[in-house]
Amino acid sequence: MDIAKNILLLKRSLPAHVRIVAVSKMQPVSALLEAYHAGQRMFGENKVQELIAKQSQLPSDVEWHFIGHLQRNKVRYLASFIAMIHSIDSLKLLHEVNMEAGKLNRVIDCLLQFHIASEETKFGMDMLEANLLLESKACLSMKNIKIAGVMGMSSFSDDADLVRSEFRNLYEIFQRLKLLHFQGQDTFQIVSMGMSGDYLLAIEEGSNMVRIGTAIFGDPNN
Ligand SMILES: *Cc1c(COP(=O)(O)O)cnc(C)c1O
């Protein structure tokens, strides 16, 4: 795998407004450094332990994104440095992030994760849960988190029409939430959707942040 070349080609092929999170889970530090030296600064990981270990070995201007399921009792390990958490799926988790960020005088960017796939196993909220969360007094009083947008994962499927409709659904959710809860504010602006196999579809449907692993680093299992 020529990581630097993959990043260059990817950047060239995407519209300028689409940000690339390089998903480096299960990749060795050497691979992340290669990406870093090719100019990549945003990295995504889905395990807390692994993220912490890598963070200590990479330059401090890396912007770390947490993209996996996050347990509340692990938030404190990330709070001092994490740039964005893509996987907020409950008020309790958001509360924990706000509390830990508050102790450090930080504001942590958070995305609300939605369940858009047809599979049962993927984490995330639905529109009703999100509306309840955003309307709650608890959420409105949180000073150390910024709700910056939404995130979702499509079904693991070759059916392009199905995947497209799921991305379209997430983009509609984003627009409705923006209208209902963030009118006149420009803080709610990120639509994190699209992975190696479906990022072109996702961008066509409104994604402005793609999370790409395999297409940059190769398959970690091979
Ligand atoms: C692994 C992972 C990705 C990247 O997947 P690839 O198919 O390797 O690009 C993106 N998002 C999440 C949440 C992931 O767990």
Image (cartoon, grey):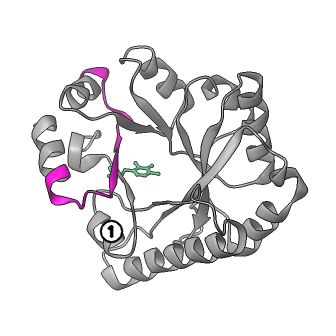
Q: Residue at x 31, y 66 (%)?
A: 198
Is the residue indicated by label 1 positioned so its CB lies within 8 Å of ligand 1?
A: no
**Which is more toward the observer, 158 or 24?**
24
Q: Is 120 rendered above or below residue 51?
A: below
Left or right of 39 on screen, residue 84: right
Q: Residue at x 81, y 52 (%)?
A: 139
Q: Position of residue 158 (x, y in %)?
A: 30, 75
**Which is more toward the observer, 165 or 12?**
12
Q: Quadrant of residue 206?
A: bottom left
Q: Residue at x 75, y 74 (%)?
A: 128
Query: Could you tell me the amino acid type at mark 1?
Result: Ile
Q: Quadrant of residue 55?
A: top left
Q: Is residue 118 something one can see in this rendering?
A: no
Left or right of 8 on screen, residue 153: right
Q: Is residue 7 something one can see in this rendering?
A: yes
Range covered by the magenta-colored residues: 11-30
Left or right of 216 on screen, residue 208: right
Which quadrant is the N terminus positioned in?
top left
Determine the residue located farthest toward the top in the rendered image. Answer: 57
Q: Is 17 covered by the magenta stretch?
A: yes
Q: Is 199 covered by the magenta stretch?
A: no
Q: Position of residue 135 (x, y in %)?
A: 82, 65
Q: Position of residue 195 (x, y in %)?
A: 34, 58
Crowd band around label 1 with a 10 angstrom C-alpha radius: few (<14), some (14–19), many (20+): many
Residue at which label 1 appears: 203
Q: Secondary structure at mark 1?
A: helix
Q: Position of residue 112 (x, y in %)?
A: 62, 57
**Which is more toward the observer, 199 or 144?**
144
Q: How many marks?
A: 1
Q: Residue at x 71, y 22 (%)?
A: 104
Q: Is 1 rendered above or below residue 138?
A: above
Which quadrant is the C terminus positioned in?
top left
